Image (tube, grey):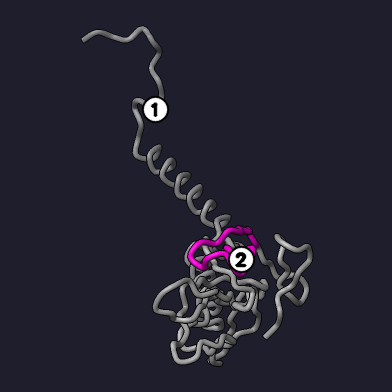
Amino acid sequence: MQTSALPDLAHTDAKPVHWLATATAMAAVVAAAGLFQPDATATASASEHRAAARDSAAPAVTAPDPAGVTYPLDCGPVGQTVARSAPGDLDGDGGPETVAVVHCAAGSGTPPSGIYVLTGRNGAAPRVVATLVDPAEKLNVTDFTVRDGRISATLLGYSSPSVPRCCPDELESATWQWKGNAFVRSAGPAGSTARSA
């Protein structure tokens, strides 16, 4: 056996007392670390309790269903059709409204559309609270979206009564947003506001 040129090290010939002292020191370090750490179980259960309380206090709010609502649109015996609808929190109160594009259920042709804002909270039946586009304006609605509290649509219209109803010759992009106590239209005539129902 070859001997090392290095001097003997004390820990290479450790006695049981040495190992006992090392184990005791390690146990003290682990215990001290535990005193300064927050209790993970208590923290998790407290946050779970807060989340459960929040969820039970505020039941899920759904947007009003546009089906079955009576819209201010005279269609006679043919009835009304909800062509498109989209939910969104339009007034920033945390509860969703629904925006609906509605027209008469004509068998042919392109009937004019209306854009309506619906609300219905706490079990109340949905109702129209604003008219953004009145069908009396004889416009058709395309590219309809509700996003970030804004309602956007492309409006197709006619420059005169002689223009065939199949072929609109006017196009306008319109956006509405709730400001103060009304929906303000940011495209088209400056500062026009939606009529309240």
Magenta residues (range): 156-174
* Residue 163 on the magenta span: yes
* SS for callout 2: strand
Name the mark nearer the viewer: 2 or 1: 2
Amino acid type, mark 2: Ile
Note whether residue 191 is visible.
yes
Q: What residue is shown with label 1?
A: 11
> At label 1, which amino acid type do we have?
His
Percent x, y of residue 75: 51, 87
Residue 55, image x and y in percent? 51, 78
Give percent across and percent down for residue 114. Answer: 57, 76
Q: Quadrant of residue 94?
A: bottom right
Image spot of residue 1 (x, y percent): 21, 10
Contact, CB < 8 Å: mark 2 with mark 1? no
Predominant SS of the magenta segment: loop
Which mark identifies residue 151? Answer: 2
Residue in the image at 70% along x and 82% along y: 196
Can residue 120 be spotted in the picture?
no
User: In the drawing, what numbered circle is on residue 23?
Assistant: none
